[in-house]
Amino acid sequence: MSASILIVDDSKLVTDIVKMRLEMHGYEVEVAHNGEEGLRRVRDSLPDLVVLDVQMPGLDGYEVCRRLRAQPALEDLPIIMLTSMDDRRAGFEAGVDDYLNKDLDLLDLPNRVKVLLGV
């Protein structure tokens, strides 16, 4: 069984690219287009890993991450923050496990996922 990954990003272009990259490596991928939907999907399907954007309408990625980390059952859920912003400190303080720049690091995403999933 392949690992399941939830992408939470309001950009269809970004979600399409990230989804394609991850599916090429055999991962099952779901998409949520905002923070609230992302929280619901995590609760409903409990993915193995979350790829999370910072800037989204409504709940931003930092708040989504904090809410996930506040739930004891999700403390160890791997979260990769994917953004074009460069405020890594805020991401790590919110509880992300890794931080990738959309413009520079997207090609490295499958490798980072593999490391965080321990496969």
Image (spheres, rainbow, N blue to C red):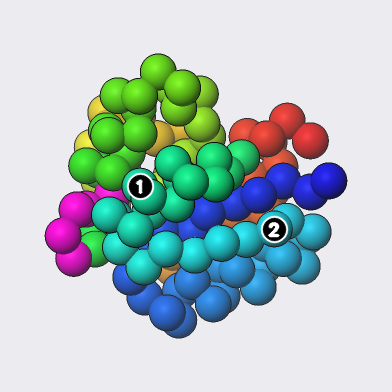
Foreground of the two, 90 or 67: 67
In the image, residue 77 lies at what x, y percent?
Answer: 51, 31
| Position above or below: 42 against 73 | below
Tell me the kind of residue under disc 2.
Glu
Task: Check disc 1 and report its element: helix, strand or loop.
Answer: helix
In the image, residue 19 lies at what x, y percent?
Answer: 60, 68
Report the residue at 54% width, 40% height from top: 46
Residue identified by numbered label 1: 39
Q: Which mark is residue 28?
A: 2
Q: Which residue is farthest left?
A: 58
Return the disc, 2 or 1, that comes first in the chain's sequence: 2
Q: How far apart are marks 2 and 1 (CA)?
A: 18 Å
Q: Which residue is farthest front?
A: 44
In the image, residue 80 lies at what x, y percent?
Answer: 47, 44
| Left or right of residue 56, residue 69 in this image | right
| Position above or below: 13 against 87 | below
Q: Which mark is residue 88?
A: none
Q: What stretch is highlighted in magenta?
A: 57-61
Tell me the kind of residue under disc 1.
Leu
